[in-house]
Image (cartoon, rainbow, N blue to C red):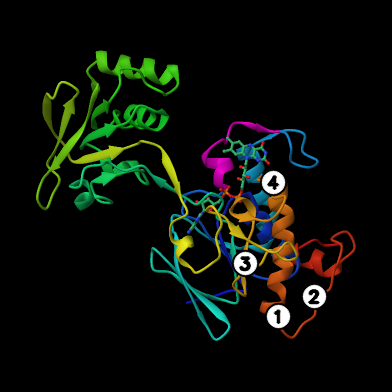
């Protein structure tokens, strides 16, 4: 059981800045995110796109903003739990017990939900049999490419992820790429490289085909594909990979007994607390009159929620407002020597 002052759900820009504000006022937090990386929508949806409306930063990309936010909380050494989803929460003796999909448990007086538009989940194969092999030989992301060395790999998809992995894995594996259309959505340089590898017989390509079924009992043996004319082919394989993009799902957050309104969580604007004591909601997921779904609003909401957490984390202390420019406490917490 991990004890902490605050558990933050979501490592998007709002969750990250809220962590900074908690550190500044002397509270500890742990941060859980379903994604395998920090940054939320900024890193998952537009890492290379310039943002022009972050106060005092005339222009920066989603990735640059994320890196700056990570740097800003570095002095506090907060722990991230990535690739994990907060699944269940329970209230006991004025504290919240929080359980994740991977079996981690946290005990905390405060939960800050900075879950944006929900957790990003891979779009999966519609084929029921795939579930049997999911996470083992039917995969939607790659953590260690070495596991595919000298293996047969069938990749489905026509976007950048499918193309990049087909090209990369073809160096050491027998790769077949399958896409339901003739045209690819990936960048033209990758499409050219793919065609080159196909003509050199370093990779096999089937277009206008989609998955029909996977076969195998204990072990995956083959995948059956079909085209619009109803013709099918069976390809022997060790792994099947699907790269069809991500969908966002509010998922378990909707089951926690919180008031919700059109997939958002209404909050009061004094401290961004929800209808449950000790549960706060900030960023894209919260709603109140005049809410703007902008990063700068999320920063302000995180600052107030952090102060809201203080009274439950330190019930016997009074929160004292301090400027970072003047406070010795703050400078000590940031490790600044004068
Ligand atoms: C293409 C595009 C361009 C944009 N441009 C701008 C712009 O120019 N300026 C601007 O201000 N805003 C812009 N935005 C909006 C901005 O990205 C969002 O307002 C911002 O990302 C919201 O931050 P957040 O931290 O609230 O949520 P998110 O960034 O969505 O992060 C939420 C995180 O929570 C995680 N999560 C959710 N549920 C769970 C769970 N149960 N367990 C674990 N993790 C969970 C998700 O995986 C995600 O990483 C843009 C958005 C898009 C899509």
For disc 2, the marked residue is 319
- Depth order, front residue of 299/230: 230
- Dot 2 or dot 4: first in sequence order is 4
For disc 4, the marked residue is 292
Q: Residue 2's x, y, as percent? A: 51, 74
Numbered label attached to residue 207: none
**Magenta segment, which residues?**
39-51
- Depth order, front residue of 194/332: 194
Left or right: 298, with 177 as reference point:
right
Quadrant of the frame with the C terminus = bottom right
- Dot 2 or dot 3: first in sequence order is 3
| Residue contact between numbered discs 1 and 4, judged by CB atoms under 8 Å | no
Looking at the image, can residue 204 be seen?
Answer: no
The quarter holding residue 79 reads: bottom right
Disc 2/disc 1 C-alpha distance (Å): 9 Å
Disc 3/disc 4 C-alpha distance (Å): 18 Å
For disc 1, the marked residue is 314
- Dot 3 or dot 4: first in sequence order is 3
């Amino acid at each position: 059981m991990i004890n902490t002052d605050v558990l933050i759900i979501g490592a998007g820009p709002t969750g990250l800045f809220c962590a900074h504000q908690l550190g500044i006022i002397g509270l500890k937090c742990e941060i859980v995110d379903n994604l395998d990386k920090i940054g939320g929508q900024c890193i998952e949806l537009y890492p290379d796109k310039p943002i022009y409306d972050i106060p005092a930063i005339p222009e920066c990309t989603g990735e640059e903003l994320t890196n700056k936010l990570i740097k800003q909380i570095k002095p506090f050494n907060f722990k991230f739990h990535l690739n994990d989803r907060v699944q269940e929460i329970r209230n006991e003796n004025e504290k919240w017990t929080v359980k994740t999909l991977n079996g981690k448990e946290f005990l905390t007086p405060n939960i800050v939900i900075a879950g944006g538009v929900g957790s990003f989940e891979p779009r999966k194969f519609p084929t029921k049999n795939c579930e049997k092999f999911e996470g083992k030989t039917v995969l939607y992301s790659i953590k260690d490419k070495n596991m595919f060395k000298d293996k047969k790999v069938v990749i489905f998809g026509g976007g950048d992820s499918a193309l990049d992995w087909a090209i990369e894995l073809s160096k050491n594996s027998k790769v077949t790429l399958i896409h339901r259309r003739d045209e690819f959505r990936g960048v033209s340089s990758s499409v050219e490289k793919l065609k080159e590898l196909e003509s050199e017989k370093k990779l096999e390509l089937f277009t206008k085909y989609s998955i029909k079924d996977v076969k195998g009992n204990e072990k995956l043996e083959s995948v059956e594909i079909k085209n619009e004319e109803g013709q099918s082919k069976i390809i022997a394989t060790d792994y099947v990979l699907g790269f069809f993009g991500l969908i966002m799902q509010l998922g378990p957050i909707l089951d926690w007994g919180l008031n919700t309104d059109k997939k958002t969580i209404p909050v009061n604007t004094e401290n961004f607390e929800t209808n449950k004591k000790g549960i706060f909601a900030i960023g894209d997921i919260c709603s109140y009159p005049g809410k703007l779904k902008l990063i700068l609003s999320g920063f302000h909401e995180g600052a107030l929620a952090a102060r809201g957490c203080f009274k439950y984390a330190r019930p016997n202390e009074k929160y004292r407002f301090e400027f970072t420019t003047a406070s010795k406490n703050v400078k000590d917490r940031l490790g600044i020597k004068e």
